[in-house]
Amino acid sequence: MNEDLRRPTYTPAPPRARYEATARRVRQWASTEVRQTLVEPVLHPSTWRIRALGMTTLAGHPLFYFIWTWWLPQPYEDLVLRLLMSLFGLSLLVIPGLTASPPSRLAATTFSLIFWITLPWFFSWMYFCNSGNPVWLASLGAMFLIYYHLTDWRLATVGSVSGLLVAWAMFHVVGPEAQPITFALGAANAVVLTFCWFMAITLGLSSSNLRREQLTYTLGTMGIMAHELRTPLATMQLIGEALRNETREEGESGQQRVEMLAQRLTNLVRNMNHQIDMQITNARLMRLPRHTEIISAAALVDVAIADYPFRSSRERDAVVMRVHGDFRFMGSRTLFLQVMDNLTKNALRSLAAASTASRPGDLLIEVGSQGSRGRIVFTDKGVGMDDELQARIFQPFFSTDRGTGHGLGLAFCQRVVLGAHGTIRVKSAPLRGAIFTIELPLA
């Protein structure tokens, strides 16, 4: 045989194929780094952190007005502007809801606006008004580092660029008379600020990647552990089937007892597999699929209830579904079935913790719509929760069930609902039950 025929040949990919492969990698990177990752208006928005930021902004501006006016005078200072910035800091302390964690959509928008005004816009404005002198060059460089450590790097990048441009335009329209920045000074300052900006982006991006990798690793480990449980469960099911087959020829009473034990073992395996499916889905919290379909809310809830592994007939009877009006929405049916399972499981666990035996209707699931929004409401008569717990239940790894809870169920629910452009909220009080409301735009 000809040697050339046996030698493997290599044909380089055509330019179009290489371009498409590169474009695919770029799109994948953009999806991972920009679209799928949470954009946080304030990193780690705890009550203490928000109050500390408010106090710093409230007290810092009058303090620096005194320093730059009386101690180390600068060319431009404005008491009214400083007091206005202080009021923004005060708003973080007195406006209800801004210290809640996780923040609402309105609170997140308010955070972004306040920090955009008090950081990139204000510092850029003062830089131009003070003719780019060394004090405000250093202050603007420090602002970049602060802003990127305060908020998500994507928001910080957009906010820095827009704040700088808006301040520059306003300075040329309504700014005070100031000595013009020479070309040499502007070029030198641009080099320094570019370095500060580059380092701020690098640190912000690396911190974001580190947080995501830590969370992904933890969630992946949980998913692997949950998956490994399937092997002993499969063995348990095989043992149950073997017991059932071995007693086919025994007496009727013995066979009934073994049949009952085998059925209980089968139900246990079914329930455990259901929990494993939930754990594995929750472990994909940061990598939820994006495919969507038109879903009937009533049919979704009906299937979720029918497939739920209730532990007893009393537990099943406690769940009542009431459809005031069906609606359709866009989303992933698989993920929303998991959301229904998580909310049902939490409600039943709350009912089980209550002192009284559950009765029909103790968990009421209602489906309806109003205007352009549809609603799925879970109302239980369980133990309820206080305001502090309500503010934290959607945080990853926070659980009210310290014994068995992993703290990912409601965080997963929130991600899925937000991914469908909806909202999920809770209203509760100790010993008064809880109401979880999902609102979704109509398809």
Image (spheres, rainbow, N blue to C red):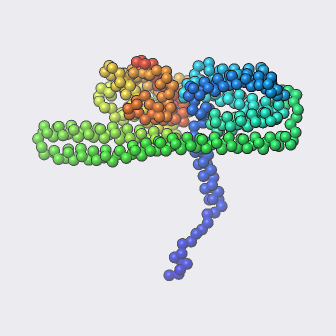
349 on left or right of 166: left
363 on left or right of 199: left
Q: Is residue 52 above or below residue 254?
A: above
Residue lying at the far front in this picture: please name it: 71
Q: Residue at x 44, y 31 (%)?
A: 399
Q: Quadrant of residue 118?
A: top right
- Of 147 and 371, which appears nearest the observer? 147
Residue 158 in view = no
Q: Is residue 116 above or below residue 59?
A: below
Q: Residue at x 33, y 28 (%)?
A: 316
282 on left or right of 162: left
Q: How many marks?
A: 0
The x and y percentages for residue 311 are 31, 32
Q: Residue at x 74, y 20 (%)?
A: 83
Q: Quadrant of the C terminus?
A: top right
Q: Is residue 130 above or below residue 225?
A: above
- Of 261 and 138, which appears nearest the observer? 138
Residue lying at the far left in this picture: please name it: 251
The x and y percentages for residue 317 are 32, 25
Residue 137 in view = yes
Q: Quadrant of residue 48?
A: top right
The x and y percentages for residue 86 are 70, 22
Residue lying at the far bottom in this picture: please name it: 1
The x and y percentages for residue 313 are 29, 28
Q: Residue at x 50, y 81 (%)?
A: 1
- Of 306 and 37, which appears nearest the observer? 37
Q: Quadrant of residue 271?
A: top left
